[in-house]
Image (cartoon, grey):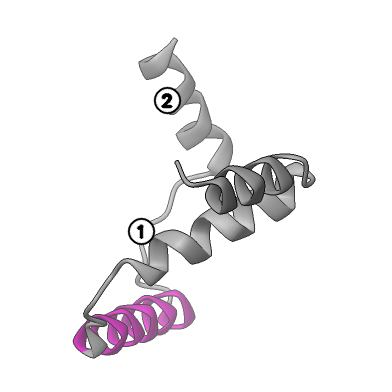
Amino acid sequence: MSSILDKMTNEVLSLPKNDRAKLAHELIVSLDDQIDSDVNTAWEKEINRRVKEIREGTAKGRPAEQILSEIKAKYQ
């Protein structure tokens, strides 16, 4: 590593955990050359569909406790 990069790395590693996480996220996002605007549109459509189902009472849900219990059982 270059001396500037070494210096920056040492400074960044001394930041609080949340700040390091935010910086890591920003660095990863900066590596993505293309932003797919269709993805945002698709997510918006899906969210609206789910909200509509909930409001109409047609959504099929399960208690969060049940889901969390299943996840714990699967990964323990």
Residue assigned mark 2: 70
Q: Secondary structure at mark 2?
A: helix
Q: Disc 2 or disc 1, which is closer to the eye?
A: 2
- Locate the C terminus by quadrant: top left
- Give amino acid for label 2: Glu
As measured in the structure, the alpha-carbon distance from the residue carrying label 2 to the one carrying label 1 is: 17 Å
Question: Per the image, is 55 magenta?
Answer: yes
Residue 31's quadrant in the figure?
bottom left
Residue assigned mark 1: 60
Nearest the viewer among 58 and 6 is 6
Q: How many marks?
A: 2
- Locate the N terminus by quadrant: top left
- From what the image shows, is residue 59 above or below residue 69? below
User: Which span of residues is magenta-colored?
Assistant: 38-56
Residue 20 screen position, x and y as percent: 66, 49
Nearest the viewer among 54 and 48 is 48
- Give amino acid for label 1: Lys
